[in-house]
Amino acid sequence: MIVHLRGEVDLASAPQLRRGVYELIDQGHQRIAIDLTDVDFMDSTGLGVLIGALKRLRESDGSLVLAGIKPAVSRVFEITGLDRIFTIHGSLAEIGVASGGGS
Amino acid sequence: MPVTSEDQFSLEFTSEPDFISTARLFAGAAARYYGCDEDAVQDVKIAVSEACTNAVKAHDNALISTPVRVLVRPSGDRVEFKVVDAGGGFQHEGNGGGRPVDAEALLESGIGLQIIQALFPDTEVAPNSEGGTTVRFSVQRAG
């Protein structure tokens, strides 16, 4: 399942992201790829949601892949060391996933 | 450093998550105004977002609705940013900055401050006269 995110992820929008991703997990999706190509900003609130999703997916032997992280967003992954925790790809095409669809 | 009042910017915003993006835009614009380079502008936006997130949460926890303030002023070859809340102080788990943080700790609060400290080593967090917390940091203006 591919999730396309758009805009900025902060305290205001993180709950929506959490709901959306957790709903997919609850529906039984085990392999989730989040395309961050159109995300211009993310702070620790967004990272917290992604960490939570990663934990839940790993508990059920699932996987979470992130792709298309912009430099402005990658900064916060590097500072927190999360660039070593997540599986991160340059783009969805890089992992052989066709773009389009998702939510 | 002598600073005149017209050299300063301030933003006061209702303590709601929806306004944190406005605070980021404001801080980024102020950093650009004072000649910070684009990398510094992005770092300022992250730090102000984290500080405002802590502030809004602190106000929420303290059940108060007073505004959060973001203050910007030049100080020599640097620009100083302050985020001022009245929220009774938030948990203070700074590690001195620079060190990658434990990923699990992301699920706890306190990570925001560690990010600010990693971005700006001169970050100071102190109680203020309004019963809340002031986060202060400064950034180099481009030569």
Image (cartoon, coloured by chain):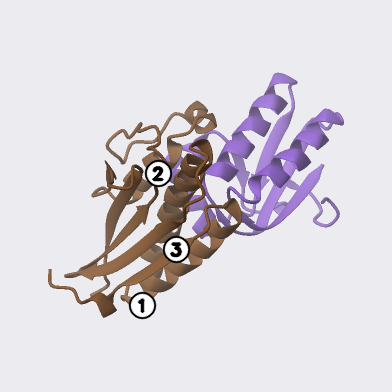
Chain colours: A purple, B brown
What residue is pinned by disc 2?
B115
Of B64 and B128, nearer the camera is B64
Q: Quick one: SS at disc 3?
A: strand
Hey, which quadrant is residue B82 in on the image?
bottom left
What residue is pinned by disc 1?
B33
What's the amino acid at mark 3? Glu
Q: Relative to A86, is A58 on the left or the right? A: right
Q: Is residue B130 visible?
A: yes
Q: Is residue B37 visible?
A: no
Q: Quick one: SS at disc 2?
A: helix
Provide residue B18's location: percent of width, then percent of height. 61, 56
Q: Earlier in the sequence, mark 2 or mark 1?
A: 1
Hey, which quadrant is residue B139 in on the image?
bottom left
Q: Quick one: SS at disc 1?
A: helix
Of B53 and A85, nearer the camera is B53
Report the disc number at residue B12.
3
What residue is at 27 percent from the left and 72 percent from the top? B142
Of A70 and B14, nearer the camera is B14
Please report, as a chain letter, where disc 2 is located.
B
Report the disc number at residue A40.
none
Q: Earlier in the sequence, mark 3 or mark 2?
A: 3
